Image (cartoon, grey):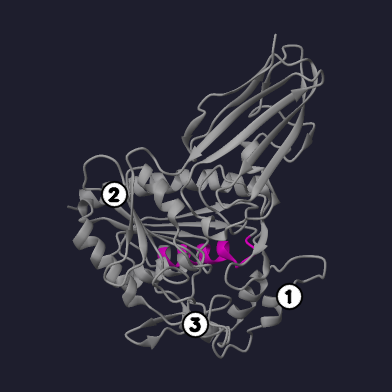
Amino acid sequence: MSATLTIDIADDLIDQPRRIAAHGLTPGIARLTASLVHPDGSRWQSSATFQIGAAGTLDVDAALPLSGDWQEAEPMAPVWALRQISPPLDDARSDVVAPRHIALHIEDSEGNQADAVLIQRLLAEGVTRREVRERGLSGTLFTPAGTGPHPLVIVLNGSGGGTPEQRAALLAARGYHALALAYFNAPGRPEYISDTPLEYFAGALAWAQETLRPRAGFIAVAGHSRGGELALLLAATFPHAVSAVIGYVPSAVIHGTLRAGRPDQPRDADAWTLGGTPLRNIWQGNPHADWHAFDYPARPDVDIRQAPAFVNVERDARSLAAARIPVERIAGPLLLISGTDDGFWPSTAYCERIERELLARQHRWPVEHLRNEHSGHAISFPFLPTTDIAKVHPVAGVVIDGGGTPVANARANRQSWARVLAFLAAAVQAREAQG
């Protein structure tokens, strides 16, 4: 009997789990290898060895490897355990929505081999992509298949800037109009986050409501990291325009430009303005601002984990109060997502504080905090490689340890995405019930 390698769903959206199995193997040791050439040109690979029993079969989800790049029975391990073995050739293609083809290969102790290809798509059939360059906006709009109107989610990146097309495309696959909205480091926008006016986002909200006419007028804002800070700030500043908020590893306070500002500015320069007036950030005039902790690792043999600097700066009660995001003004439900081992900033502490404040004020809308144990900063959608934990910041050019472990980060991606979809469905339903 010849060896075979099967995938129950070989070609589907990236967030679709698959079952990988092998049959017809010789009892003994077999090695499974996964290989990916990313659209940006980088190459990734993972492998593990397994003990094959008398039946000659392998269920990859259920089996624990003898050795290799993963040791847990977390779904889709050959994919999230992929490690980069050569760098990107074109960084501009890191967030493109091109499909990913992952080659799987198994070989047993007698040299019997089998191959299969797993295809992960971000762009679902019928979803359309359109660049938006009107009213001074820079973004990409993804429209779901089928007749509308559709509820809308505006998606925001963090301190690397750019246009978050992948998350927007995947939301469109799940039935949402999704606007990947850039605000710096993108076509037609400033290179840096410095002095970004909130009026730009007010214009985007107005354009979306007038042009797209979303279902029940529903517009959610979903942001990651600095984008999470921004999502909360926008919902608090323009509560009439934002129906729901999703904060991936957000901040509870306003920060300065930090690593994303103009090179001629100090780190505590203004990131956000409103009506031409800078919004006070927690670092300005703060006697506990410790930039050494921000710039250097705690030990020479580790990468920078800048989170302790963010904890330290909150020791000044006056600065903390002045920079606090007034989340009680938000007029809609909130979903907060954090990682307990976040190396960038203390996202779990931020989310717990927001949740406490809103509960204490008897906030009339639901507030949920999904706390991902042992995971780091880079929480996204499921079945991505999660091994690239310490990486170069796209604006600052320094290596920062985002925290977590590959398996914890993979689990956070999977669990948080399920919560995001459930949260959005409930928020839209509640909006419609309100008329």
Q: Which residues are magenta?
A: 342-358
Q: Is residue 388 left or right of residue 48?
A: left
| Nearest the eye: 422 or 377 | 377
Residue furthest top in the image: 1
Q: Which mark is residue 296?
A: 1
Residue beneath disc 2? 428
Q: Is residue 142 left or right of residue 336?
A: left
- Residue 255 coordinates in the image, percent (x, y): 51, 77
Q: Secondary structure at mark 1?
A: loop
| Mark closest to the chain's N terminus, 2 or 3 | 3
> Residue 433, relative to residue 9: is it above or below?
below
| Mark closest to the chain's N terminus, 1 or 3 | 3
Q: Report the Cα–Cα distance between label 2 and label 3.
A: 33 Å
Q: Is residue 290 magenta?
A: no
Q: Secondary structure at mark 3?
A: loop
Q: CB of mark 1 within 8 Å of CB of mark 3?
A: no
| Mark closest to the chain's N terminus, 2 or 1 | 1
> Residue 255, relative to residue 213: is it above or below?
below
- Residue 175 coordinates in the image, percent (x, y): 32, 43
Mark 1 is surrounded, within 10 Å at the Cα level, by few (under 14), some (14 to 19) or many (20 or more) other residues, namely some
Q: Which mark is residue 281?
A: 3
Q: Which amino acid does the dot numbered 2 rest on?
A: Val
Mark 3 is surrounded, within 10 Å at the Cα level, by few (under 14), some (14 to 19) or many (20 or more) other residues, namely many
Identify the residue shown where x is 53% and y is 24%. Answer: 8
* Disc number lying in front (1 or 3): 1
Q: Is residue 134 left or right of residue 15?
A: left
Identify the residue shown where x is 75% and y is 71%. Answer: 297
Q: Which amino acid does the dot numbered 1 rest on?
A: Tyr
